[in-house]
Amino acid sequence: MDFWATVLVLFRRWYVTFPVFVLVLAGAAGVYVMFPKTFVCSSSLVLTVPRGGGSLPADPKFPNPVTNPLVNVDSGLGLSASILIQGLSTGDVAQQVGVTPGGRTTYKISNGTTNPELMITLPFVVISAEAPTAREAHDVVARLGRIAQDKLVEQQRALGAPRATYLRAFEVVPPTTPEEKTGSRLRAACVALAMGLFLSMAAAFAVESGARSRRARSGAAKPQPSLNGSAYPAGARTESAPLLRR
């Protein structure tokens, strides 16, 4: 069946397609409204070296020069950020921020890129969280930021680094205002609309097929006249009467 024949069937069976299409629109709107909302919040940290550098002077009389921490870039910052990211991605940290396995609240820690080759070269720690409410998403990101500060200190203390050389996590972007993630709701509504449209077409063609079948049966059941003018059912066998002899 070509395109115009399909359109003709849909218009001929408008009393089926139109109500189904209205129900489809109502169902898609209901899916969009009732689909669970998800809010997204994020923040960014950057690791910096102290103003005096990452090492203590050999002679206290000649201290290290004071440098701007944002300019004093060391190659170990990327590796330290990678270690910190691994430490924040454990199940213990998830329990501390109230994230349970299989729940709707999730978080992700990265260095802002998906390229594995840049994992140990960028000194950034990007925190993002998704939750069913805006307040929960913001709280998860804020708690992770505090835990990141404490864990960075713990890692350096465990390595025995001098206190004066501790790296610091500077909050470049504080927790952002949570925004609703509408992509999932739109996809669900579009899927419901597409399925409804297919259902509308299927209903129209089902009615059309039923009407054709009824017409075919009624045409086959009509009686057919015989040669002598009498009406006999189609396919009935008749015998001619014997001729009378005088």
Image: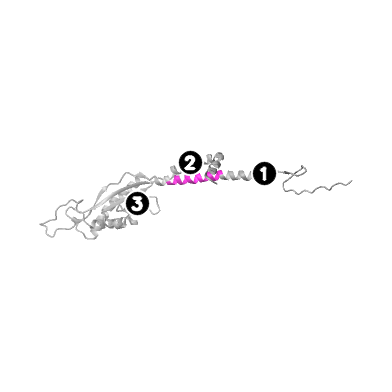
Task: State the SS at label 2.
Answer: helix
Mark closer to the chain start, 3 or 1: 3
Judge whether residue 117 is colored magenta: no
Tell me the CA gap for discs 3 and 1: 68 Å
Horizontal side of 241 relative to 82 (left or right) equals: right
Q: Nearer the viewer, mark 2 or mark 1?
A: 1
**What span is in magenta?**
187-204
Q: Which residue is mark 2?
A: 25
Q: Main secondary structure of the magenta part?
A: helix
Amino acid type at circle 2 is Leu
- Of residues 168 and 222, the one drawn nearer to the viewer in this rendering: 222
**Corner quadrant of residue 115:** bottom left
Where residue 15 sits: x, y (%)? Answer: 56, 39
Do the residues under discs 3 and 1 have CB atoms within 8 angstroms? no
Amino acid type at circle 3 is Tyr
Tell me the CA gap for discs 2 and 1: 39 Å
What is the basis of the colouring in this image?
Answer: one colour
- Of residues 222 and 132, the one drawn nearer to the viewer in this rendering: 222
Mark closer to the chain start, 2 or 3: 2
